[in-house]
Amino acid sequence: MPKFKLIHLLLPFLLLALTILSSCKEEDPLPVLGCTDTGAVNFDANAEISDGNCVYPDFQVNFNYHVNRQPFHFDSVYLLGSGNHWVKLSVVKFYTSNYELESETGTSTSLSNSVVLSSPGTRSYKVGKTRVGDYNRLTFNVGIDANNNTRLPSDFPVGHPLNSSEMYNPAQGFLFVKVRGVVDTDFDGLFSYPVELDLGMIDLLRTQSFDVDLDIKDQDIKNNEVTINIDMAKLFESIDLSVDYSINYLDNPSLADKAMNDFIAGMSKE
């Protein structure tokens, strides 16, 4: 058979083979899904599209209560105040809020809507989620900001620190610091007068700031926590408890301001 006839017969098959081969070329690979946020603990450098499952580290604050470097215990007797009167405390609670961590480059990470209600009965509190990074400054408020302080406890869900009628006074809003106890005013061994400290109102809001050294890179809470010491002796350092054992901002703003400044002075980073 002549060659041209053979080629003529095979040509359709050759064309069909070329068509099939061209249609079987490799398809483009699918994009890699994963966490694309460098501030997350599960950041994936190979990820091209976020899968919406980024995980962020927890930040924790611890409060250690003491009196002149001795551990604080409810109903123990302590010499407190400018007059060194015997005092037994049964309630100590205070609010901190709006926590913020600052990096060495000056970038701040806000733990949005963070509110902690602290008391000696509990040492550690999960403040909120932060971002992976090195931080050298912690800032927070002692008290509640003006926006939240105009709201009611019932405005917040059950379990939220601000859903607390005990820490709310309709005339003042939320109490930033609340202390209850009894005092021996005349050294006769009798605790005859109640200690009542109600520090509220926006004028008493204070900002506290401490140098820290945090290298937050995972969920290991030991690397993601700061411990603050609270010296209860400082709380009444400028107060003569023989006469000023009941302090309320509405009754005596200047005395309440002095007590709040004393409380702030009693805070230090461990």
Image: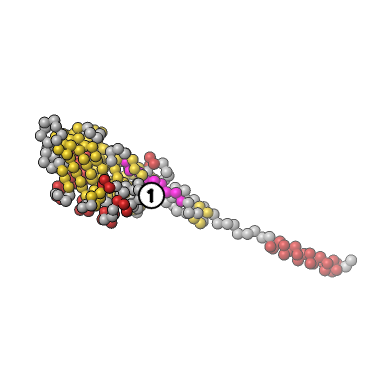
Magenta stretch bounds: 54-62
Colour approach in the figure: secondary structure
Q: Viewed as shown, does residue 33 lie left or right of 168?
A: right
Q: Residues within 10 Å of mark 1 (few under 14, many from 20)?
A: many
Point 14% across, 49% down: residue:
252
Is 241 contained in the magenta span?
no
- When asked about the image quadrant of residue 216, the answer is top left
Q: In the image, residue 205 lies at what x, y percent?
A: 23, 51
Question: Furthest-right residue in view?
Answer: 1
| Nearer to the camera, 246 or 28 | 246
Tell me the quarter of the image containing the N terminus.
Answer: bottom right
- Give the secondary structure at mark 1: loop
Instruction: Report the amino acid beneath label 1.
Output: Thr
Residue indicated by mark 1: 130
Q: In the image, residue 90 lies at what x, y percent?
A: 23, 37
Residue 37 visible within the image: yes
Point 16% across, 51% down: residue:
250
| Nearer to the camera, 77 or 189 | 189
Is 24 above or below relative to 214?
Answer: below
Is 71 above or below relative to 48?
Answer: above
| Nearer to the camera, 1 or 135 | 135
Point 26% across, 56% down: residue:
150
Q: In the image, residue 115 lies at what x, y percent?
A: 31, 49
Tell me the quarter of the image containing the C terminus.
Answer: top left
